[in-house]
Image (spheres, rainbow, N blue to C red):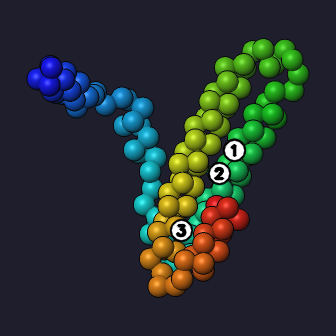
Amino acid sequence: MKKLVCLGLCLILSGCTSTPVDKNDAERKVNVIEVSASTIDEIEEMAIKDVEATKAKSESERDALSEKITDFDVYTKKVDKVKSYYDDALKQTESLSIRLREYAYKYAELIMNEDVSYKVKYKDLSGIYEYI
């Protein structure tokens, strides 16, 4: 009985190691950034600028599209451009979300490496929710 359990476990584990890499996983790795900031203030500033730049880009694209679409007839002729805008906005939002997670990770890493009490670290970690 023990041999059957071991054999079954070996077969299960050997099947788990050969998982193919999904195309989306490769695309997601491209979006990861390296946060090179050395202080918490730099990370906060980088994150805020990143959000503002992404927002400004999306708004300018939206405004340019809305100038071209003045009524329903024009909309029906350019519905592919509207769809393209929304697809791009979704990609930008997903990419920003990944970058914000990287900022939060670096933020937490810097705080946890400080030589202060855990109470101070816990208090400082609240900045992740405030600024990132």
Q: Amino acid at mark 1?
A: Ser
Q: Where's residue 127, x and y in %?
A: 65, 69
N-term mark: 3 or 1: 1
Q: Amino acid at mark 3?
A: Tyr
Whether residue 48 is visible: no
Image point 47% across, 85% down: which residue? 115
Residue at the far left in the pictured view: 3
Q: Sort mark 1 into few (<14), some (14-19) or many (20+) by Cα contacts within 10 Å.
A: some
Report the side of 38 relative to 131 (left or right).
Answer: left
Q: Where's residue 16, x and y in %?
A: 26, 28
In front: label 2 or label 3: 3
Q: Amino acid at mark 2?
A: Thr
Q: Where's residue 90, x and y in %?
A: 63, 35
Q: Is residue 75 or residue 116 the one in the foreground?
A: 116
Give the quadrant of residue 28: top left
Image point 67% across, 20% down: which residue? 80
Residue 94's disc is none
Q: Is residue 89 or residue 76 the one in the foreground?
A: 89
Q: Is residue 74 or residue 107 the one in the foreground?
A: 107
Give the quadrant of residue 62: top right
Answer above or below: position of 97 versus 102.
Answer: above
Q: Secondary structure at mark 1?
A: helix
| Residue linked to disc 3 | 107
| Residue linked to disc 2 | 54
Q: Are marks 2 and 1 in contact (CB under 8 Å)?
A: yes
Answer above or below: position of 79 versus 14.
Answer: above
Quarter of the picture holding the C terminus: bottom right
In front: label 3 or label 1: 3
Q: CA distance from mark 2 to mark 3?
A: 20 Å
